[in-house]
Amino acid sequence: MGNSDYLSSKLCSYAEKGKSAALPSISQGQLGIFNARCVNNSGSVANVGIGRLQSPESLQYLSVSGVTSSTGTYAVVPFPTASVPQDAFDGTANQGFVVSSGRPLNLIGVTVSTLNSGGTFKIDQWNGTAWIEAGDILEQVADYNTTGDKYHVFSLNNDVVKGGDASLAGVASEPENKYFTRIYTTGVLGGAVVIDDLWAMAFIELRRGIIDKGQLFAQYDWRQFFLLEAGESLAPYFSEPSSANQFASFFTTAGL
């Protein structure tokens, strides 16, 4: 693995649910992860995970309308940022947004800057022939009637595969090589919901119902450690956010 020194991150506090990287990415090459640890100090039972936080450059954001189980009408729009906010929902039924990614996702977060109430929200993923509901929903937005950070957290349906329905061809970038997650409403909202940030994570580990002071610890074989690709970063997820929650990881770039 070369002669470079191994690096170790110190145990640090992590106050968010799962948004910012706790272990930064590198622009080129890989990071080898030997172990990672999350400590739930929230004061209550929590679901805790460790995931690959995807870079915005690796994601594509699309609007969708006319949603059915087999198709939709898609359009690529700029990735939502503070300077270029986007409508996540325009107020009509069977409309929403799609995130395209190189890995199957378990968490999609958005920051709402313009709120509206109403709607019934669904999370779909592609199984090769149809859109199916995501696996077990761990966290879902019931209403976008407040601003701020919102989370959609879910386990993968075993049938999820790369690709999407035929209407994505010629619209999305390389749909045959991407996973697609579709979030939409089956009901009418009071008006548009605008977001100015989006982030996405693919879980490496997830444990449900960790007691207060309990921890999630993932250990990988030093001869074949877990690899983060260039642009990916490591982040924890706590269903109960607290500034007392902690995260640490032991990692290396040696020989990679």
Image: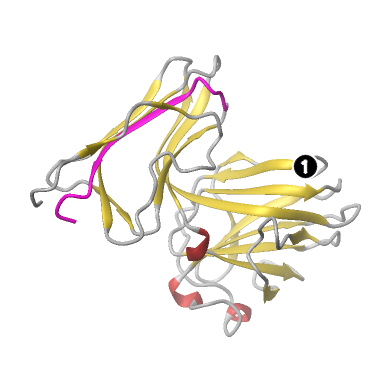
For disc 1, the neighbor class at 10 Å (few under 14, some 14 to 19, many from 20) is some
Q: What residue occupies the far right of the structure in this picture?
A: 190
Position above or below: 46 against 233: above
Q: Position of residue 180 (x, y in %)?
A: 54, 64
Q: 22 or 168, which is in the foreground?
A: 22
Q: Residue at x 57, y 27 (%)?
A: 241
Q: In the rendered view, how is the structure colored? A: secondary structure
Amino acid tagged 1: Thr
Q: Position of residue 84 (x, y in %)?
A: 71, 63
Left or right: 223 as drawn, with respect to 117: left
Q: Residue at x 61, y 58 (%)?
A: 124
Query: Badge 1 is on which residue?
Result: 147
**Is label 1 in a helix, a strand or a loop?**
loop
Left or right: 35 as drawn, with respect to 181: left
On the image, which quarter does residue 192 sit in?
Answer: bottom right
Q: Residue at x 57, y 82 (%)?
A: 169
Q: How many marks?
A: 1
Question: Is there any visible trace of residue 141 in the rendered image?
Answer: no
Q: Position of residue 19 (x, y in %)?
A: 54, 42
Position above or below: 116 against 72: above
Q: Residue at x 47, y 69 (%)?
A: 178
Q: 253 or 100, which is in the foreground?
A: 253
Q: State the extent of the magenta-drawn residues as a range.
A: 241-256
Position above or below: 21 against 134: above
Left or right: 28 as drawn, with respect to 104: left
Residue 246 within the magenta-colored segment of the rendering: yes
Question: Is there any visible trace of residue 118 in the rendered image?
Answer: yes
Left or right: 248 as drawn, with respect to 136: left
Residue 159 within the magenta-colored segment of the rendering: no
Q: Position of residue 229 (x, y in %)?
A: 33, 58
Q: 33 or 95, which is in the foreground?
A: 33
